[in-house]
Image: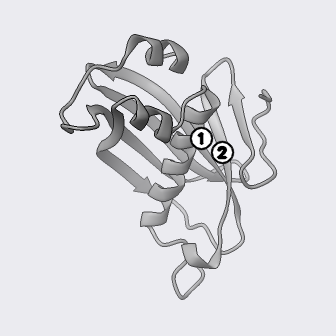
Amino acid sequence: MMSSLQTSRPGEETLTEQTGEFHHAVRVYIEDTDAGGIVYYVNYLRFMERARSEWLRARGYSQQTLLERGIQLVVHSVASRYHRPARLDDLLQVTATAGELRGARLVFHQQVMKDGVMLSDAEVVIACVDASTLRPRRWPVELLNALEV
């Protein structure tokens, strides 16, 4: 994995070792926008979901492998702010940084940026649940070790 902060192609990821900040590049397509060519607000959350999924994949896990082990990660809560609009064909950098772990919950701090300017930021709380009962469960130690939280 690269240590650079700059991403230049959609799907390209980087990890800043010092801060643990993961970057995922996303291109804005017509399907992401409203009639005026502005990104529809809920799509910022979709971009953040992709970044968290790629953050997980970069650490050797996927949503599918977790499901096969009886673990599901679900969004518990989101607090988001929108600062500036993204537009059709913009190349965005979406960050995901794991924060505080509280039992079954892990807090992510995320940003969507364009050319270093913040467009949106959010605190997303992810819960680890048993895939069959959907009840909260503690994160498995081996998963926490791999995730470096």
Q: Is residue 26 left or right of residue 131?
A: right
Decide which of 25, 138 is in the foreground and name it.
Answer: 138
Give the quadrant of the N terminus.
top right
Residue 77 seen in the current view: yes
Looking at the rendered structure, the secondary structure element under dot 1 is helix
Q: Is residue 13 left or right of residue 110?
A: right
Residue ID for mark 2: 24
Residue ID for mark 1: 54
Mark pair 2, 1: CA separation: 7 Å
Decide which of 21, 9 is in the foreground and name it.
Answer: 9
Q: Residues within 10 Å of mark 1 (few under 14, many from 20)?
A: many
Residue 29 horizontal/vertical position (percent): 65, 73
Q: Is residue 56 left or right of residue 103?
A: right
Q: Residue at x 78, y 41 (%)?
A: 6
Q: Residue at x 61, y 30 (%)?
A: 21
The image shows residue 13, relative to residue 8, as above or below, that is above
Residue 38 seen in the current view: no
Foreground mark, 2 or 1, reads: 1
The part of the image, by quadrant, that contains residue 141 is top left
**Label 2–label 1 contact, CB within 8 A:** yes
The image shows residue 36, relative to residue 113, as above or below, that is below
Q: Residues within 10 Å of mark 2 (few under 14, many from 20)?
A: many
- Residue kind at label 2, given as amino acid type: His
Decide which of 134, 88 is in the foreground and name it.
Answer: 134
Question: Which tag, 2 or 1, sits closer to the chain's start?
Answer: 2
- Residue kind at label 1, given as amino acid type: Glu
Residue 130 horizontal/vertical position (percent): 26, 32
The image shows residue 33, relative to residue 137, as above or below, that is below
